[in-house]
Image: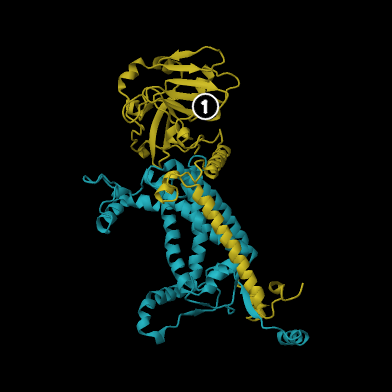
Amino acid sequence: MNPEQNGMQLKPIRKSVPEKASHGLFRERAPEIIEVAPSTLRRRTRRDLFVFGAGAIAALAVGGSQLPQRVLQRLGVDQGRSITPKDKWLLNKAQRLDDDVAEALYSPNRLVPTYTKSQITPLKNNYNGATPNPGYISKWRLTLDGLSSGVTVSLDIAALLARHQIHDQITRLVCVEGWSAISWWSGLRFDDLLHAYPPVSQAKWAHIESSVNLDANGNPDPYFVSIDLLTARHPQTLLATHLNGQPLTAEHGAPLRLLVPVKLGLKNIKAITRITYTKDEPPDYWAKRGYSRYDGI
Amino acid sequence: MPHSTQERIATRTPAPQPRVRVVRKHNVLVRISHWLNIPLLLGLIVSGISIYWASPIYQHNPNPQTGAFDYFADAGIWICAHLPGLRDYASPPDWVYNHASLGPYMLAPAMRLHWCCAYLFMLNGLVYLAGVFAGGEWRSLLPRLNDARGALRIAGYYLRTPFMMFRPRRRNPPHFNTKYNPLQRLAYLSIPVAGLLSVLTGWAIHEPMQLSWLAALFGGFDTARMWHFWLMWIFILFAVPHVFLVFVDSWDTVRSMITGWSTRLEIGSRANEP
């Protein structure tokens, strides 16, 4: 190769500051001055502009295609002609990766921080729809299915409270929206219920439902979450009956709600009416609406 | 003796055609990560503002007339009331969110976009670090003892510049004997530091239970959210003068971030650099 074409590899011809100034690890080094044929420089500039320009166009295409349909319509890119994919494959991949990372970070032995009573903060009723009429509470029963005994068990709140030890904890509930609240929760450990009514041996998941959940217009809209049994067995995962020393009100999921501080608030299902243990991952209300399936925090 | 070597080369090389002299300014990994920051930070900011909207940190009691309770909504209402052509805007409280984010009620897609950009941003940070160490450029970013004075001198020069058109004779920028001037060093170092803090506070509010020690380091979950919010503004506040000064400065500066080399041979930097 002749030296003109290999211009950038030429040895530096001169240091612009004396050799002595270059000593010391942290001291700025003088730049190497390179002599190069103008044609080489032009060629390399063209090449780099092309490479970086192509990269920019590729980034714009991939990034743009991943924006939500509604945003693309607002920008005037996609006027209902569906030129952009509805399936946001890259974002779905990122969500799966993030779920895997959250699952890898989870440790069954790591306890979440606990607080003192003076640190308790107000907890708002964040029912997504209307709050159910408290009338359901007196007729409430919990159904357990997918048990190793093969039978379906139906329990009332008195039976649950009589049989299990009540634990107290003051922990933080973190909502997917970004707010959080510290509350004093009391209830039985989910782990104790799993020991009292063991699930089928292959079970890895609990499908927890609330049939009393309502939508914004007050119509029935059953709520359901998926909880992996590893999380259900965590010592701070409670089936809570009391909030701040008082029995749960309808706003907070009377008479029994899930309190799982290692998950986002949306997994902390209120007014549980049914728990089904399954081998395969059950559906989840918010995962169906584009949120994470795992929600580990 | 540097002179004798140069003479020897000169006598040995047969009649050289005219050549240009250049210096290497940016490692290729630094250049790649620099440009990748634009789409990644844009994606992080627009999705981040959509996530912020779900539960704004800075809110007040709902305004009895508009029902708005957060300051971005107030800003939207003000903009629609004062800018011509926006008087009939459908939902003034959403104006800022419709123009600076994915829009309100976009929490689920915004979080996916945020995770996607965040993982790529962390990878890009590693690419940057690899480049900045491979090329030895990290030395040019280290703060020096009297940088505070120098940074103030340049900031003063920038602030006076708009008035210099009346006194063109006095228009000589402060000169420093380093690759970057003190204000540049401060700005270019604060960006990777802000990037690192954004990543750390991001993890603190993403995994506040498994990484509760990290959340505690930033004053707990709620305070870490505020850190994360204000760190966004560092990138925005950096980008505005950065882009402006690139256009004020010469093509050589933009080109050096694409090709890596510059025809400005002297180590000293003038104030007019981005």
Q: x, y percentage for residue B114?
A: 48, 47
Residue that sits furthest to the front in the current view: A81
Quick one: B175 or B89, which is closer to the camera? Answer: B89
Image quarter of residue B132: bottom right
Q: Is residue A227 left or right of residue B100?
A: right
Q: x, y percentage for residue B175?
A: 50, 80
Q: Chain A hue?
A: yellow
Quick one: B273 or A220, which is closer to the camera? Answer: A220
Q: From this viewpoint, is residue B30 visible?
A: no
Chain letter, colour cyan: B
* Residue lying at 30% horizontally and 23% vertically, measured from the top left: A133
Q: Is residue B153 left or right of residue B265?
A: left
Residue B130 versus residue A183 in the image, above or below: below
* Residue lying at 40% horizontally and 25% vertically, measured from the top left: A222
Total marks drawn? 1
Quick one: A147 or B243, which is closer to the camera? Answer: B243
Q: What chain does mark 1 sit on? A: A
Q: x, y percentage for residue A178?
A: 41, 42
Circle 1 sits on which residue? A282
Q: x, y percentage for residue B179?
A: 56, 74
Image quarter of residue A218: top left
As shown in the figure, which amino acid type bears the numbered disc 1?
Answer: Pro
